Amino acid sequence: MKKKIIVISVLLLITSGLFAKGIYNGNIQLTGSYNTNELQYISTTAPTLKIDTIDFGLETWHTFKLPILLEVGFMFDLDMGFGSTNLIAEEWNIGMNLYGLFGPAIAINVLNIVKFNFALGPTFDFTITTADDTSLVSYGSGFGINFQTLFFPLSPVSPIFGYKFAAAVGEMIYGADSKTAELYTEQIISLKNQVYLGISFNW
């Protein structure tokens, strides 16, 4: 028990020291965008399928200052989008997309006016859509990047402008909603290109 108390005390001292010296920077961000995902078949020459969604995202960045202008740390990003797809019979139907990224991050603060954040790491992608009596689910994992400009980083609230790209390899499963219906599986590559705006709450 004493050892646990000592470890917790040391961690609290280190954390408070980082805050006091201004070494640590963190935030929570709310983002929004209009996004188009593309699903490309690997084994067939079928046309590229598209998912047009309005995305709402939650990001959090945590970086630590180095003796130079550079900051290093990590970030986490989770997006959920709702919109239309042409995944079933080339008809536009209601769909949902879920995307996430977690990875190391670097940042450059320019005169406390703008801060450039960059992160890269593993991603996941999940899409579901239904139309009439047919359902479709696609999922995959891959690699992505996130680059953003954060204005007035020392302010408690800052506007942000950013770009995300991700490529994931996975499967698409589709078929009728009947219990006796046969399910079909295709290998796919999912591509995400997204420009987004948002607001950052900094500490």
Image (spheres, grey):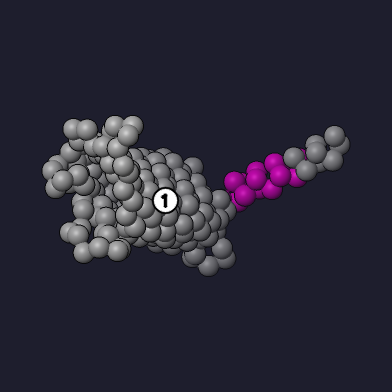
Residue 119 spot, x, y in % from top left:
44, 59
Type of amino acid under label 1:
Phe
Q: Residue shown at 48%/52% (left/top)?
A: 102
Q: Position of residue 89 (x, y in %)?
A: 15, 46
Q: Is residue 70 magenta?
A: no
Q: Front-most of 191 and 194?
A: 191
Extent of the magenta region = 9-22
How far across and down, in percent of the image, does residue 191 sit? Answer: 30, 58
State which quadrant residue 28 falls in.
top left
Task: Judge left or right: residue 162 versus residue 107.
Answer: left
Q: In the image shown, does 54 or 153 lie closer to the viewer?
A: 54
- Magenta residue check for 13: yes
Front in this rendered view, residue 172 or 154: 172
- Residue underneath mark 1: 124
* Residue for point 40% across, 44% down: 78
- The overriding secondary structure of the stretch rendered in magenta is helix
Residue 149: percent from left, percent from top:
34, 56
